[in-house]
Amino acid sequence: METVEDLVLGHPFFRDIDPEAGRVVAGCARNTVFRSGELVFREGDSADWFYCIRSGRLALELHAPHGGPIRIDTRGPGEVAGWSWIVPPYRWYCDARAVEEVHALQFDGACLRRKMEDDASLGYLLYKRFVPVILRTLQGTRMQLLDVYARPGR
Amino acid sequence: MPGPAADVRAVAGADPWSPSPARVRERRRETGDTVTLALEPADPAQTRFAPGQFTMLSLSGVGEVPISVSGDPDEALLVQTIRAVGCVTSRLAALKPGEALGVRGPFGTGWPLESAAGRDLLLVAGGLGLAPLRPVLYHALARRERFGALALCYGTRSPDDRLFRGELEAWARRADLHLAVTVDHAGPDWEGEVGVVTRLLARTPCRPERTVALVCGPEIMMRFTARELEHLGVAPGRIHLSMERNMQCGIGLCGHCQWGPFLLCRDGPVFPWERIRAAFGVRGL
């Protein structure tokens, strides 16, 4: 049976991580499951977690006035969801909902922040993993803003 | 089953200036502004095309526009998908079965399917760019043993803007095809992916060192897709893009579709990324 540490070291987000650092990170992780339709986190709530998705899909949603939720992004197997835990004031900026049953590794953000404060090299290592995710999401968001598939003139 | 006709360019060479008559056999609405017409040309040779080629469709007294062929290269109809964005395309899209139009072509270079044989084949489509890639999928699925992994990554604006929805559902059920669809915007009823098409590329079963990638969509989408494919390890010579400009004569004489050193109707529309990457970097070209 695989341990949480095995699952952390085997997840693409932590590919090729130094095993000792992986063990330290795994100390803040646990396995979790969300049922289809279940709210994973809610805009404005304290962002104490992030998730490495093992299977299933999460949708990130924003609520507009006088309308229902708008799905702005999805996260699937091998991807990471949530970085508000790493940036003050540690609050979610959107909702996340399981579109289908999700199996994920859930990381305690407060636990990791303490370890990163105590060990700057661990902090640097984790920032190096998160910054590309943030950059790619920003680039994707810019592409979505360009609305490149719109009818000319629309 | 044989590949696309080797002598398709001879069709364009017969009399490339004169439109031949054709009739609409079938019309299917794809989205709010896009239809697919199945045409029956008077000259059956015009139904022979290489996936990736385009024709010039015309209405007398209205005008002429380039439209990619979107049908099955093994069928005896000329199938074309038209988005109503201007005067000519709006009139073409409104044609009903039995009505007539003019056809020149097919013209241009096709996708490099012969050199893709034995390799993994990755199709990346954005919006209406799925239309010129659909013949590739028909071709590859009819000759499935010729290719390794086969994948289609398709990005579009919203769930309602997906083309060929019935076929997408059928393709999604196939075990020998990896299909991934994503949209830029969606409501809560959409249970699929939301985000840009480049996000899908790392999750296909295609092995970068064995992959031939065919990309069609808006230029900015193709630019980012080609870069991402290179980042994943696909050689630039095995990434192919379909370009679009103001094609008019279709045979490289009028110069309307000049793009840097290229005449897209004659030298393209399909190009290897390594050949056109420099032109992509020229602002305003």
Image: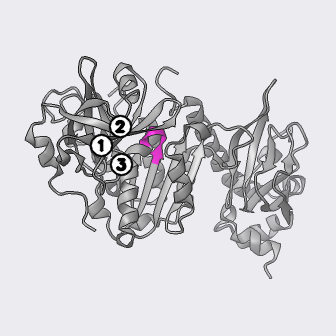
Q: Residue furthest front?
A: B98
What separation in Å lies between label 1 and label 2 (alpha carbons)? 6 Å
- For residue B71, which numbered disc appears in the image? 3
What separation in Å lies between label 3 and label 2 (alpha carbons)? 29 Å
Residue that mark 1 sits on:
B276
Q: Position of residue A86 (x, y in %)?
A: 80, 46
Residue A77 found in image quarter = bottom right
Q: Earlier in the sequence, mark 3 or mark 2?
A: 3
What separation in Å lies between label 1 and label 3 (alpha carbons)? 27 Å
**Relative side of A67 to A151, left or right:** right
Q: Secondary structure at mark 3?
A: loop
Image marks 1 and 2: residues in contact by CB distance under 8 Å: yes
Residue that mark 2 sits on:
B280
- For residue B118, which numbered disc appears in the image? none
Q: Position of residue A17 (x, y in %)?
A: 68, 67
Q: Quadrant of the N terminus of chain B?
A: bottom left
